[in-house]
Image (cartoon, rainbow, N blue to C red):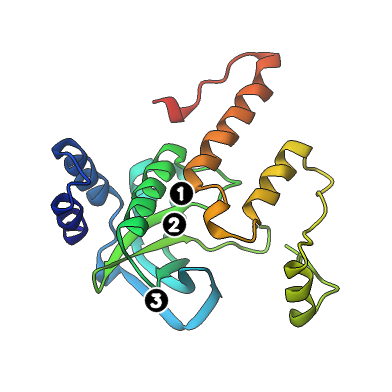
Amino acid sequence: MDFIIDIMKTEKQLSPEEIEDLKEKRDEFTIPKKKLKIYYEMPLGDGVSSTVYIGFIHGKSPLSITTNLIETQRFQDCKVAVKVPSTFGSDESDQLFREIDSMKKIGYHQNVICMLGVCFLNEKPVDAFELADKDFFGQAPYPALGLNDLKEFLKAGNRLSCPQAATEEIYEIMLNCWNEYPEERPTFETLVNVFHGILEKATKSYGYVESSMDE
C-alpha cells in the first residue's frame, strides 16, 4: 500500500494525519502475499471494474485477529472470495480506503458478507471476502429466464419485485443499487449510513441500542 500512499501524497490528496491513518489501516487489514492463494481458473463473477475468484487464506484472516470473536475464528485456513480490480487509480484507491474503514466499523455480523482483509499483488490491492455458502446475496433470482432473456429483461428496465420480507424503504434501496449506471448507485459508505439510520429508527420503540459504529 505504500506506493498508493506515495501517489496520493504527491497529488496532495492526503494530509500527514490521513497518511498515518492509512498506514495504520494497512497494518491491521493487510494479508501477507504468501498467505493468500487465488484460483484464477475458478472465477465467481465479473463486475464493472473487477473480477471475483475463489481463493484460500492460510492462517488467520485480519478480521479474525482484530475482532477476536469466536464467530470469526472460522475465517482461517479457509476458502474465500477474492475481488481483483481490472484497473486501479485514484478513484479506486479512495473507494478501497472507504470500504476498509466501513468494514472496520461494522466488524462482524452474521447477516453481512464480511471483508476479511486486503492483499497487495503486483501493485494492486485485492479484497478477500467471506465466501457465501448456500444459506446466503440461496435461489437464482431469475429462475425462469435464460441468460439472453435476462439481459433483455434488465435492459428494458425490469427488476425483481419487492421481496415479501422487505419494506418499501428497503426495496427502494435495492432498486438504487440496481441502477443501470454504476456511478448513480449508492456507495458502500452511503449504504452503511442509511442502514445505520434504519436500525436506529427501528430500535426507538424499545430504547436506544448503542452501535459499535459510534466507537
Relative image position of residue 11 (x, y in whole percent): 18, 52
Tell me whether the residue at label 2 lies in contact with that at label 3, contact meaning CB atoms closer than 8 angstroms. no
Q: Give the tally of numbered discs.
A: 3
Label 2: state its secondary structure. loop
Is the residue 140 above or below the residue 2 in the image? Answer: below
Is residue 79 visible to us here? no
- Packing grade of label 1 (10 A; few <14, some 14-19, many >=20) is many
Q: Secondary structure at mark 3?
A: strand
Quarter where residue 2 is shown? bottom left
Query: Which residue occupies 79% across, 68% down?
Result: 142
Mark-to-mark CA distance, 1 and 2: 6 Å
Quadrant in which the N terminus appears = bottom left
Q: Is residue 54 above or below residue 158?
A: below
Sooner in the amino-acid sequence: mark 2 or mark 3: 3
Q: Residue 92: x percent and y percent?
A: 36, 59
Left or right of residue 175: residue 160: right
Question: Contact, CB < 8 Å: mark 1 with mark 2?
Answer: yes
Q: Which residue corresponds to the image point at 20% horizontal and 44% vertical from the top-left?
A: 14
Of badges 2 and 3, the one in the foreground is: 3
Q: Which residue is mark 2?
A: 75
Residue that label 1 marks: 72
Question: What amino acid is found at the position of numbered circle 2 in the picture?
Answer: Phe
Q: Which residue is mark 3?
A: 38
User: Front-most of 20 and 76?
Assistant: 20
Distance between mark 2 and mark 3 Cα atoms: 16 Å
